Amino acid sequence: MKYHPISSSLFVKNRQNFMAKMKPSSIAVFNSNDIYPISADSTMPFEQHRDIFYLSGVDQEESILVMFPDAPKSEHREILFLKETNEHIAVWEGEKLTKEAAFNTSGIKTVYWLQDFERIFAEIMALCDTVYVNTNEHYRANVETETREDRFTKWWKNKYPSHSVAKSNPILQRLRSVKDQLELELIQTACNITEKGFRRILNFVQPGVWEYEIEAEFIHEFLRNRSKKFAYTPIVASGKNANVLHYIENNQQCKDGDLLLLDVGAEYANYSSDMTRTIPVNRRFTDRQKKVYNAVNRVKNDATKMLVPGVIWSDYHVEVGKLMTSELLGLGLIDKADVQNEDPNWPAYKKYFMHGTSHHMGLDTHDYGLLHEPMQANMVFTVEPGIYIPDEGFGIRLEDDVVIQPSGEPFNLMRNIPIEADEIEDIMNA
């Protein structure tokens, strides 16, 4: 890992919070992700399953966490199973976690090698009634690959069919959505790295550069600041490409007069940042571009103020729609008749702003969080309105990451990343 060690107190607290929600005489099991093959002997870079990381800090393949708060043996209330390291693995792959290192990372005292899992698991299953399975129930999830968790669930249900089943996901959706202070510091670090990347490209972008060159500038800055990668596939969209919401080809040349939409974020210690900025390729906005830009920025600022405890996500988006409607009327993109005759299920503003404004963010860029439940302090949300005008050849989106406060306006984790149009121009022309 490139990131600095994280205090095990975070993972100890996370496990305590989870176990407090478990049914009596129950266990919960969490598996690492697979290392996925490409072809031949090639594999994709390993990405740890965010749930086992959240609960243990273990960032290694073939790991299993078992929690059994009612275990008669105190040493079996929290157990880690790890792939045993050896000299061969150390030479070819690098040393894996030792039992001591696993304890220092997670705060879990009982660590077994993976080869002992079935024997210990049989002993535990004889003493419990319910097993919490870890299924992916995120509202955006669309998983076609059978995961390591899926295979494990099939295995234990076949071997121990008389046990009851419970779901860990509803517990995790609530716990993970409200961030600990240590988590907020990690997300802030990711945002700070993103800031460095953005400031770097402000001095780099000019007519004639290619979108992929800009992508390269970002990843250069991210890696040199202990980020291992982009938090998500970056969008570097010049000109009309910005009107494709998930444009990721990043293979076009930036032209004089274009706007450049950058939806880019660094990860740090598996935590995400999620930034969008839109800048002028020739370092000056036209009057029209600046008017639209400032309209988007006003919506972002006013929408941010609405993110307070107790707000319901769907109600919030209705109110943001009203803000955007007003701005689009002012820009002449829609008129009063469009609003009066709009379809309530697809309001007039949706022609130019067709996506949502905010989503939970944290270990996943689209993080866990139950959208039907009221917002709470220490939840992290993006705020990302946009106006997309294909007929004029540009689209503008602006996005910050903010922390809901117990009272007052949210705290902006991207407060130091330039966003005002005049400031963008000043830096690009310095």
Image: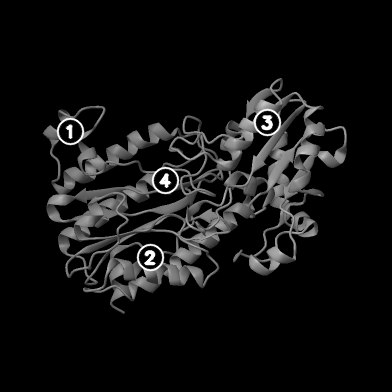
Marks 4 and 2, how far apart at CA: 19 Å
Q: Is residue 219 above or below residue 83?
A: below
**Residue carrying label 3:** 156
Identify the amino acid type marked 4: Lys
Query: In the image, residue 231 lies at what x, y percent?
Result: 47, 56
Instruction: Specify whether residue 423 is in view.
Output: no
Q: Which mark is residue 185?
A: none
The mark closer to the camera, 4 or 3, is 3
Q: Are marks 2 and 1 in contact (CB under 8 Å)?
A: no
Q: Which mark is residue 339?
A: 1
Image quadrant where residue 210 sits: bottom left
**Residue carrying label 4:** 305
**Circle nearer the N terminus (1, 4):** 4
The mark closer to the camera, 1 or 3, is 3
**Residue carrying label 2:** 418
Closest to the observer, 250 or 9? 250
